[in-house]
């Protein structure tokens, strides 16, 4: 396995924000429709009973030996508590993508803030679609999956009645992410490394 | 970690049989409501595009080092193709639980066959609830989760409209499993080990 080929994501949020569903959909889109090897996992322990939710996805063009996140390339944080709890494993070059509706303090300059819940509420009339708006943004930022693949995976996982709503949310989130200038991010999270650049 | 404390399950079936949803619900019931450490995962690779679906759950009273199945204690097979493809990692003392609606050939004498899809169709009027019937049986056979915990996890994961149907399916599967005589199973799968007993 080429180390640089492995791409690791974590999604974190409150219970009820649809983190695990978003992770399963993302994994199926990348694994079934984009031809990557993908491991998707969630762990539960004493800390899970605090109401936080965390899901991980590891992507590689080669079979995956270790299915958990070692260092995140992309961390999606849907609220401040999940950001604070799960940020530690972010790579220096990792990107934080956060729901600005619920996140105000970011521990890195490599942060992209988009108000997913506000977008879902205002553009789709349903704050619960914020997870799909976030998924659209994750797709744009990670660059490893087509929106059409995410749409197919949503159609498999979401009841027919909610399919159109969720796909519209996906596109709204992707559109918001396309307005961001990824090239304007500083190259490293770590301040010491930044000084060396 | 005490080795004997680790308990590993795999669920396998066709795409659309609701294997991953069942695994997520099972993991949340055991991890959130029973106080175990739980890792739940699914992998996608070239073989996933054949339409088979596989999900794994590892349970322990201690933190889990390796989140994937090493040797299954319980394998739920919802169709023959998944049984044939994923049986290899079963422990000698492992139990195969299979949907008799779609499975006819079992590679072990430690097999329990229940017609989950027929139960779901006949008792609930919806063959798609077979995954929840199977989940009820898994709960009874594994002995590590209360039906009430599975009910709570179902209520979190299933749209309100389908909650009652799914919980009724859970109970139908559990009732069917309680008719089985686990003590009547031979002690080992492996025929050589059986001879030694």
Image (tube, coloured by chain):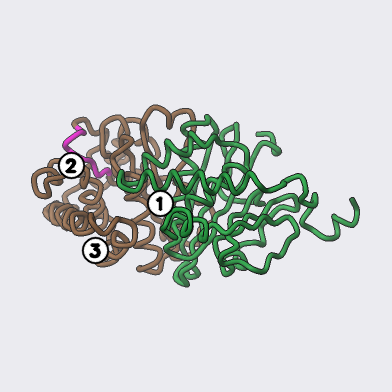
Chain colours: A brown, B green
Q: Is residue A13 left or right of residue B107?
A: left
Binning the other alpha carbons within 10 Å of mark 3 as few (below 14), some (14 to 19) or many (20 upward) gives some
Instruction: Return the disc, 1 or 3, that comes first in the chain's sequence.
Output: 1
Task: Look at the image and tell me whether residue A167 can be seen.
Answer: yes
Binning the other alpha carbons within 10 Å of mark 2 as few (below 14), some (14 to 19) or many (20 upward) gives some
Residue placed most toward the observer, B59 or B105: B105
Q: Position of residue B187 (x, y in %)?
A: 80, 49
Q: Quadrant of residue A88?
A: top left
Q: Secondary structure at mark 2?
A: helix
Q: Secondary structure at mark 1?
A: strand
Residue, x 17% and y 38% (percent of image)?
A: A100
Residue placed most toward the observer, B170 or A103: B170
Which residue, given by chain and number where applicable, does mark 1 sit on? A57
Q: Is residue B172 left or right of residue B167?
A: right
Instruction: Return the disc, 2 or 3, that comes first in the chain's sequence.
Output: 2
Residue segment shown in magenta: A96-103
Using the image, determine if residue B185 lies above or below residue B148: below
Quadrant of the drawing holding the N terminus of chain B: top right
Q: How many marks?
A: 3
Which residue, given by chain and number where applicable, does mark 3 sit on? A147
Name, please, the residue furthest toward the front: B122
């Amino acid at each position: 396995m080429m180390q640089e080929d492995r791409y690791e994501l974590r999604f974190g949020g409150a219970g009820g924000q649809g983190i695990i569903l978003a992770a399963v959909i993302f994994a199926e889109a990348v694994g079934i429709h984009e031809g990557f090897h993908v491991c998707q996992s969630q762990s539960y322990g004493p800390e899970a009973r605090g109401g936080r939710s965390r899901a991980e996805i590891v992507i590689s063009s080669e079979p995956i030996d270790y299915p958990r996140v070692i260092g995140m390339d992309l961390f999606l944080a849907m609220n401040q508590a999940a950001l604070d709890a799960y940020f530690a494993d972010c790579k220096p070059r990792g990107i934080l993508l956060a729901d600005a509706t619920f996140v105000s303090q970011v521990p890195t300059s490599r942060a992209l803030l988009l108000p997913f819940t506000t977008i879902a509420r205002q553009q789709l009339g349903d704050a619960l679609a914020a997870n799909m708006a976030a998924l659209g943004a994750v797709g744009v930022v990670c660059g490893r999956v087509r929106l059409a693949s995410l749409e197919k995976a949503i159609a498999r996982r979401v009841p027919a009645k909610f399919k159109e709503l969720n796909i519209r949310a996906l596109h709204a989130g992707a559109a918001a992410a396309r307005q961001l200038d990824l090239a304007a991010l500083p190259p490293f999270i770590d301040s010491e490394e930044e000084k060396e650049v």
